[in-house]
Image (cartoon, rainbow, N blue to C red):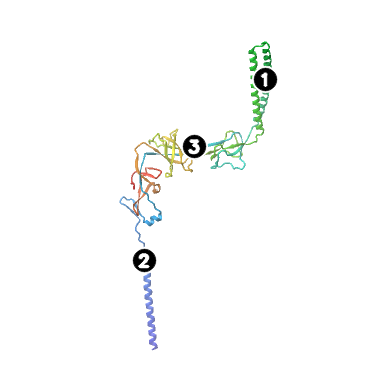
Amino acid sequence: MNRTLKWIIVMLLAGGVVVALSFAFMEGREEMAREREREAPIKIAPRISRNAEGDLVVTLDAETQKRMALETATLVTDTVHPEVAAYGRVQEDPEASFVVRAPTAGILRAAPGRNWPSIGETIPDGVSMGAIEPRLAPIERVDLVTRLSDARADVEAAEARVNAARSSFERARILNADNKNISDRALQEAEASLKTEEARLAAARRNVAELEAAAARQAAGTTPMPLPVARGGEVVEILARPNETIESGQPIVRVARFDRLLVRVDVPAGETVDRNLTMARIAAIGQEDRPFTGQRISLASNVDPSTLGQGFLFRIVGAVPSLRPGAAIVAYLQAPGAPQQGVIVPYSAIVRSGGKTWVCRQVEPDKFSRSEVAVDRTTGRGVFVMQGLKPG
């Protein structure tokens, strides 16, 4: 009986092992199947295709458009007059520039408690930027002393002549009053001589006073002379620095104001513009979406040999504060001809790549087509396109 029991136990254990192995095998197969499913490539509907015209079409669902913050705009029709694009550069307005010059020869000194002006610094109107200690050469000092001595001698001589002329006049007056012992004409000549000598004496005394004042200033020659900036602005040139010896009339600092600028543009050879135009739409190169107005001043005084076309001068109105002389600009000048009709494409919808201009159009709620367009001109609201796009 014990032997039979042992066999039964062995058979039960063997059966349990077989059942456990079967379950393990089945579980392994299911795990392998799930692994193959996870590793299988995810099939996504293609987003890029081409239409019948060969244009690229991109598919974006509503959720993707929302995440991208994609916006669309309706193309509107616009009518514009023909224009010619004339290129040029910004120039400094001479009326907005001021040069501080030395009023006398001397040594340049900085103002107490103030640094010497630097490039880009803005100086207000009337501020003193420094001073000049006058410098007199020895020959100038000797010359002033000599001229003062001569002037004093002239005063003494003039006083002697006045005294003599007065005595002569008094004698003639007495004789004329005593039974006309001297003629009236002789009396008048004596009076005229007296007045002449008195005028010469007054002039000699004024000359002495001026020379004495100059001598007093020379004696206090170390008193600095201030250098006020009569018309302030931004410092663009520094031509002298403190402790340098400068001459009378020498330029020290140049300041300019850039709230008033000029532009010169040259019309390409062969192009025709309205010679009576008074305004122009101008934009810095690369910033055509931010145009400003130019008021015509005059025709240019000469012809640019590189363009051989007529030049125009404009004064800028409403330009960005960062615009400076030398910046490249384009001006759109009105030309003769009939008005042109097209659509306005916002600047934000324009993509430039590979030297070409592209625009994306919404052909379906979830499909966008990319097309190449020819930009005929720019406007304040966007680019003007005459062909390839329809309003709506």
**Which image quarter: residue 15?**
bottom left
Tell me the element at label 1: helix
The quarter in which the N terminus is drawn is bottom left
Q: Residue at x 59, y 37 (%)?
A: 227
Q: Report the front residue among 23 and 175.
A: 175
Mark 2 residue type? Glu
In the image, taking residue 297 as reference, residue 43 lies left or right, namely left
Of callouts 2 and 1, the N-terminal one: 2
Mark 1 residue type? Val
How crowded pointer 3 is (Cα within 10 Å; few <14, some 14-19, many 20+) is rated as some
Q: Which residue is mark 1?
A: 162
Q: Which residue is mark 3?
A: 93
Tell me the element at label 2: helix
Mark 3 residue type? Asp
Tell me the element at label 3: loop
Q: What is the x, y in percent for residue 263? A: 45, 38
